[in-house]
Amino acid sequence: MTNSSLAERIEELKREKNAVILAHYYTTDEVQAVADFLGDSLALSIKARDIDAPIILFAGVNFMAETAKVLSPDKKVLLPVPEAGCSLAESCDAEAFAAFKAKYPDHKVVSYVNTSVGVKALTDVCCTSSNALQVVNSIPADQPIIFAPDRNLGSYIQKLTGRDNMVLWDGACTVHEEFSLEKILKLKEEHPAAKIVVHPECKAYIVQVADYVGSTAGILEYCGQSDADEFIVVTEAGILAEMQKRYPEKRFIPAPPEDSTCACNECRYMKMVTLENILACLENESPEVNLDEDVRRAAERSIQNMVAIK
Ligand code: 13P
Ligand code: SF4
């Protein structure tokens, strides 16, 4: 089947079953095209909570679909590729995290939404890269914090807030840690007027050369508001499709990873989602996300605490 006939059949099934597709900006262009809502982690969490449809198909990685199920337990949440994981979520095992947390009994736990439901259940308040600063600032300055699992986002927030009472879990996203400073600076030499936009999951020495640091949604917004016509984009390359769609007159240059000849950097987990597996998943209404109810409830509290912070 061609992509357009796959997309047509997906549209038919969505109407027939009253299903809604949520997709992250890091999925492929053709997957983004069949989505009803496209967003970054924060926007998708809020949408998953508020959506009015009996079936949600999550075109993204497994922690995102789990989050949707945590917030919408009465809905059927479908995940085309359950093995589409996340290096960051996998860098924080729930059992090891429980042992770590036990060493800091007076600390509040702030966890990035890129975690398993088990880690969310051990968390006081979740955050995403869009709202990590607001979440940390919502906690009294004298209250010590455990920040997990992203060490780069954690140290960036620590620097912004000047808090010396944050303990960081030592996790990272392999995609965002792979960018090469040398190659970024070379691109800057070739395009001196370009602004460098960086996701805070990148290493500190990359963040340091940025004109703007922010989440996927923040970067998109900045590129629209900036007077610049060219941007060196230091995050997952899936975002480029939306950038080009929103701002066709501007130029977006992907930053390359360190150990590769590739011109851009992609999350292999996000790219596991295809039109074929979305169609099969909608047809069979499977694989479906199911969670233990006690763990779900505990995780729900931490996500609701995040969504309540404006
Ligand atoms: P945001 O969607 O918060 O920008 O996070 C990026 C990411 O790596 C999602 O997996
Ligand atoms: Fe996880 Fe990184 Fe992929 Fe996002 S880009 S899903 S953090 S591995």
Image (cartoon, rainbow, N blue to C red):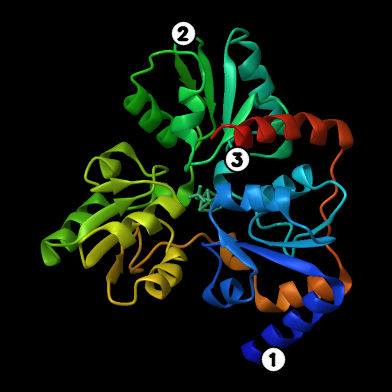
Disc 3 Cβ-to-ligand 1 distance below 8 Å: yes
Which of the marked residues, 2 or 3, is nearer the chain's N terminus?
3
Find the distance from the CA under tag 1 to the CA under tag 2.
Answer: 58 Å
Res 201 → quadrant? top left
Comparing 26 with 307, the one in front is: 307
Q: Does the image show residue 233? A: no
Three-letter residue code for mark 3: Val
Residue in the picture at 65% in, 74% down:
274
The secondary element bearing badge 1 is classed as helix
Residue 163, numbered label: none
Q: Residue at x 47, y 66 (%)?
A: 238
Percent from the top left, x then y, of residue 37? Answer: 62, 64
Q: Is residue 69 above or below residue 91?
A: below
- The disc at residue 142 is 2
Residue 159, quarter of the rendered image = top left
Residue at mark 1: C-beta within 8 A of ligand 2: no
Q: Badge 2: few (under 14), some or many (20 or more) residues near its Cα, within 10 Å?
A: few
Left or right of residue 235, residue 23 in this image: right
Which residue type carries mark 2?
Asp
**Residue at the disc numbered 1:** 5
Q: Secondary structure at mark 2?
A: loop
In the image, which is nearer the foreground, mark 2 or mark 3? 2
